[in-house]
């Protein structure tokens, strides 16, 4: 399958008064044409910084790409100038931001903000762009788009502003769409509509999607593969089936255990991962998750684990996979919760043996 994006050993730091924060520490992954990759993890794990760096949207300074490559269609984005990036952003790679309140220009009509993309990247006339902007607003489910296209962001509800952001991102039919928690501010009914819309776009245009989220239920419904991030690193990567039904990293176990159930199950305690993420101005020696990991080995506090390969598509960064390590399986409470939650998924996750 054709690779549209390759991120190789990406390192991103931010200079602060407290020191240099190593926000992304050697992240590597690829994305194929027409594929959806979900990146999950706690706040501060480096998900959004990684996605914004792909479009070179991090402020530089204080941000700095200190190493690695970002190959889009084989062309390295890292050395490109701001002017060169202007021809890529919006046209080739587009982004749906999490907070439309700070992403939409409050002084410009919503339709004008959509039209800007169409005029710049599609060479449309103003009237053609306005007609297309109206169609896009209708496509993302905004009622009375002919009226809404001339309104300002403050005249939209929160959910409508997010839909408008999605319309802007889709305007130029990008090859790569980065969605940074695009459904967080929406109710569950609208979430389903937006996810269906993104899947429809993907099927029609073979668009590749990077989906940033903390909601593993959403991951099961939209993703082909999943990358789990912790402390600026990818600690596990695999297909949806592998991550849900054959998780190998204790951090992934913690994330799965913390998934809420829609059922009234008084026996199921909602688990929380103890402790807090490490300070990335001074990353800990060894495995960054060791201090919060009840299964940590002595070597976890001394040496950083390599990325062990479990299958052709499944990798995990934990010493528990070393041949000399004791055998430790995911807690039964985790797997029980996954089995129970799988019945709520729109697209049922397949049990590994049933593939």
Image (spheres, grey):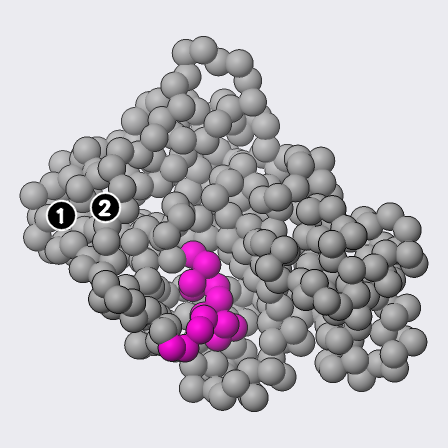
Q: Position of residue 97 (x, y in %)?
A: 58, 58
Q: Which of 174 and 105 is in front in this view?
A: 105
The tag on residue 300 is: 1
Name which residue lies at 57% across and 62% down. 178
Horizontal arrangement in the rendering, residue 145 relative to residue 297 (left or right): right
Front label number (2 vs 1): 2
- Residue 171 can be seen in this image: no
- For label 2, the SS is loop
Q: In this view, does 271 lie above or below 154?
A: above
Counting residues from the start of the chain, the first of labels 2 and 1 encountered is: 2
> Are circles 2 and 1 on residues that touch, CB within 8 Å?
yes
Label ID, residue 158 = none
Q: Position of residue 74 (x, y in %)?
A: 49, 81
Mark 1, secondary structure of its residue: helix
Q: Is residue 279 above or below residue 351?
A: below
Q: In which quarter of the image is residue 98?
A: bottom right
Left or right, residue 31 beside residue 7: right
Q: Which residue is drawn at 43% across and 86% down?
A: 79
Q: Measuring 59% from the left and 33% from the top, which residue is drawn there?
A: 345
| Magenta stretch, residue numbers | 47-61
The residue drawn where x is 84% and y is 81% is 124
Check residue 289 in the rendering and tell me which mark sits there, or answer none. Answer: 2
Above or below, 99 relative to 265: below
């Amino acid at each position: 399958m054709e690779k549209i994006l390759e991120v190789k050993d990406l390192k991103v730091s931010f200079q602060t008064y407290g020191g240099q924060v190593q926000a992304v520490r050697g992240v590597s992954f690829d994305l194929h044409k027409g594929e959806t990759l979900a990146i999950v993890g706690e706040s501060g794990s480096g998900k959004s910084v990684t996605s914004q760096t792909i479009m070179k949207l991090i402020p530089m300074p204080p941000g700095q790409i200190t190493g690695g490559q970002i190959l889009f269609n084989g062309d390295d984005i890292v050395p490109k100038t701001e002017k060169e990036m202007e021809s890529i952003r919006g046209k080739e790679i587009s982004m749906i931001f999490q907070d439309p309140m700070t992403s939409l220009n409050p002084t410009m009509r919503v339709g004008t903000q959509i039209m800007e993309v169409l005029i710049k990247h599609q060479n449309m006339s103003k009237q053609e762009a306005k007609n297309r902007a109206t169609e896009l607003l209708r496509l993302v489910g905004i009622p009375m788009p002919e009226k809404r296209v001339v309104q300002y962001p403050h005249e939209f509800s929160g959910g409508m502003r997010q839909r408008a952001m999605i319309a802007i991102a889709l305007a130029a039919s990008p090859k790569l769409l980065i969605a940074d928690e695009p459904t967080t501010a929406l109710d569950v009914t609208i979430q389903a509509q937006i996810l269906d819309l993104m899947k429809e776009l993907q099927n029609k245009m073979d668009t590749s999607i990077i989906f940033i989220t903390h909601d593993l239920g959403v991951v099961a419904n939209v993703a082909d593969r999943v990358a789990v991030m912790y402390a600026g690193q990818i600690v596990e990567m695999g297909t949806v089936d592998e991550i849900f039904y054959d998780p190998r990293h204790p951090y992934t176990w913690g994330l799965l255990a913390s998934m809420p159930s829609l059922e009234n199950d008084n026996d199921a305690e909602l688990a929380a991962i103890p402790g807090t993420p490490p300070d990335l101005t001074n990353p800990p020696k060894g495995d960054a998750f060791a201090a919060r990991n009840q299964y940590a080995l002595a070597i976890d506090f001394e040496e950083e684990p390599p990325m062990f390969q479990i299958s052709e598509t499944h990798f995990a960064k934990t010493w528990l996979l070393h041949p000399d390590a004791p055998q430790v399986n995911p807690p039964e409470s985790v797997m029980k919760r996954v089995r129970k939650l799988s019945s709520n998924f729109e697209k049922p996750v397949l049990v590994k043996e049933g593939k």
